[in-house]
Image (tube, grey):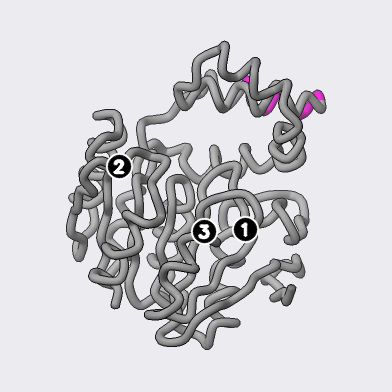
Amino acid sequence: MPTVTSADGTAIGYESTGAGPALVLVDGAMCYRAAGPMRPLAALLREHFTVVTYDRRGRGESGDTPPFDPQREVEDLQAVVGAAGGSARVSTMSSGGAVGLAAAAQGSGITALAVYEPPFVGPDPAYSARLAELLAAGRRGDAVALFMGKVGMPAEAIAGFRASPAFATLEAIAPTLAYDDAALAPGRVRPEVAASVVVPAVVIAGGASPAWLCDAARETAAALPWATFEVLDGQTHDVDPAALAPLLIKLLG
């Protein structure tokens, strides 16, 4: 797979498929190209766009260079947009929305932005402190379990998942949970970021998602000067790529 070099020298793995205007997809927490919705989504979009997917730093085939700062992920996205030709539409999932919004606020060659359910739900200092403690102690599995509990997974389901072979994949990228937490820490899109996003934007919520996620998406849209708000009927935070793709084609095509 090709890589692009970010501003701090970190290699970021990416791939592209299809033909048409460039569209970069940005994953949420615990996802990367080989484990998440973006490759299936790219396959549904490739007839309309040149779709670029990449592994956020610390995941998959991308490297990582400490110390971390949220700006590093902005620079990673900027580098991927550069590799896509210097300008691109961008579509994000979940916490990836914080990265996309911050990058769009800095220009970054982003020409339009779609944000699916950015989980701006208020700061949670207790979670942040416990996550940092677990990661510092090397307790990656416990850090993943903490995150799963935070997003509403029942304790029995977490215990069952920890016993499965797939859990090791999440443990490997557990340190990136701190990156997502840092990007979302303010609990909402920062006013100075929102005011600087001057490209067309759409914020999307799933019609079957919890009210707090829908509210977060609606409030994010209201904060952006050039944004609209859309509801994708019947969908949850774990959105079906087959349901999302037609809306992205309509909104970004």
Callout 2: few (<14), some (14-19), or many (20+) C-alpha neighbours within 10 Å? some
In the image, residue 116 above or below residue 113: above
Counting from the top left corner in percent of width and height, residue 110 is at 41, 75
Image quadrant where one finds the C terminus: bottom left
In the image, residue 126 above or below residue 200: above
Q: Which residue is mark 3?
A: 38
Q: Which residue is mark 1?
A: 33
Which mark, residue 235? 2
- The residue sitting at the right extreme is 138
Give the secondary structure at mark 3. Answer: helix
Counting from the top left corner in percent of width and height, residue 71 is at 57, 58
Q: Residue at x 26, y 62 (%)?
A: 247
Give the secondary structure at mark 1. Answer: loop
Q: Residue at x 26, y 35 (%)?
A: 208
The Cα atoms of the two marked residues, 3 and 2, are separated by 16 Å
Q: Residue at x 33, y 57 (%)?
A: 244
Can the viewer see residue 164 in this picture? yes
Counting from the top left corner in percent of width and height, residue 149 is at 53, 20
Q: Are marks 2 and 1 in contact (CB under 8 Å)?
A: no
Image quadrant where one finds the N terminus: bottom right
- The residue sitting at the top extreme is 156
Q: Earlier in the sequence, mark 2 or mark 1?
A: 1
Does the magenta-highlighted stretch encompass residue 247? no
Q: Are marks 1 and 3 in contact (CB under 8 Å)?
A: yes
